[in-house]
Image (tube, grey):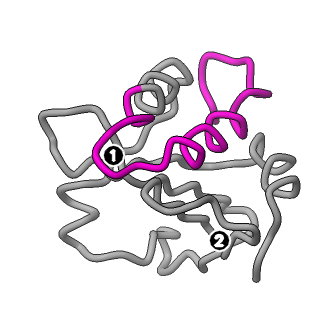
């Protein structure tokens, strides 16, 4: 299934997990974001190095724990889950000009979170 940006923006208050791919554990910058929507049984994945997609693919959560469909190495070494709004905003700010990241893509993610005015995202 695919969703558009406005549909995703409307669902953001229903997220149940937000993870960043942080390839260098010594740095806070991220190259990807993974957002889980457990009640819908899917997650979305956005690569910061690519232009923001017109239609966003939803990926099915797998297993009893509603896990992301990615390698064990990535799960154990590169993915970090965050729920504190201030931490997420800081990482996004730092990721704007990180390596090959597309600043427009990172900005669109920041815009998705602008309507959440609580200390914790979920």
Q: Residue at x 25, y 65 (%)?
A: 74
Using the image as rendered, state which of residue 91 and residue 120 is in the foreground: 91
Residue bearing the label numbered 1: 80
In the image, taking residue 70 as reference, residue 19 lies left or right, namely right
| Distance between mark 2 and mark 1 Cα atoms | 18 Å
What's the mark number on residue 69? none
Q: Residues within 10 Å of mark 2 (few under 14, many from 20)?
A: some
Say whether residue 14 is magenta.
Answer: no
Quadrant housing the N terminus? bottom right
The residue lying toward the viewer, choosing from 26 and 121, is 26
User: Are circles 2 and 1 on residues that touch, CB within 8 Å?
Assistant: no
Residue at 50% x, 57% y: name it.
Answer: 34
Q: Residue at x 59, y 44 (%)?
A: 104
Using a 10 Å C-alpha cutoff, classify the residue at mark 1 as few (fewer than 14 neighbours), some (14 to 19) or many (20 or more).
some
Residue stretch rendered in magenta on the structure: 94-122
Which residue: 59% across, 58% down?
A: 36
Q: Secondary structure at mark 1?
A: strand
Residue 42 tag number: 2
Q: Residue 119, relative to residue 105: is it above or below?
A: above
Residue 101, image x and y in percent? 40, 49
Where is residue 27, by image quadrant?
top left
* Figure quadrant of residue 122: top right
Q: Is residue 3 left or right of residue 44?
A: right
Circle nearer the N terminus (2, 1): 2
* Image coords of residue 73 (percent x, y): 18, 69
As helix, strand or loop, the secondary structure at mark 2 comes to strand
x, y percent for residue 40: 75, 68
Q: Position of residue 48 (x, y in %)?
A: 46, 53
In the shown orientation, is residue 68 left or right of residue 37? left
């Amino acid at each position: 299934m695919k969703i558009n940006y406005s549909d995703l923006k409307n669902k953001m208050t229903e997220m149940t997990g937000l993870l960043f791919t942080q390839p260098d554990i010594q740095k806070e910058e991220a190259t990807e974001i993974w957002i889980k929507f457990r009640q819908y049984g899917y997650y979305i994945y956005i690569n910061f190095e690519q232009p923001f997609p017109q239609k966003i693919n939803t990926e099915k959560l797998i297993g009893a724990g509603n896990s992301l469909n990615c390698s064990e190495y990535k799960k154990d070494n590169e993915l970090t889950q965050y729920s504190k709004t201030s931490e997420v905003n800081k990482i996004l700010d730092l990721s704007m000009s990180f390596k090959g990241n597309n600043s427009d893509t990172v900005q669109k993610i920041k815009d998705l979170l602008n309507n959440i005015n609580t200390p914790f995202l979920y």
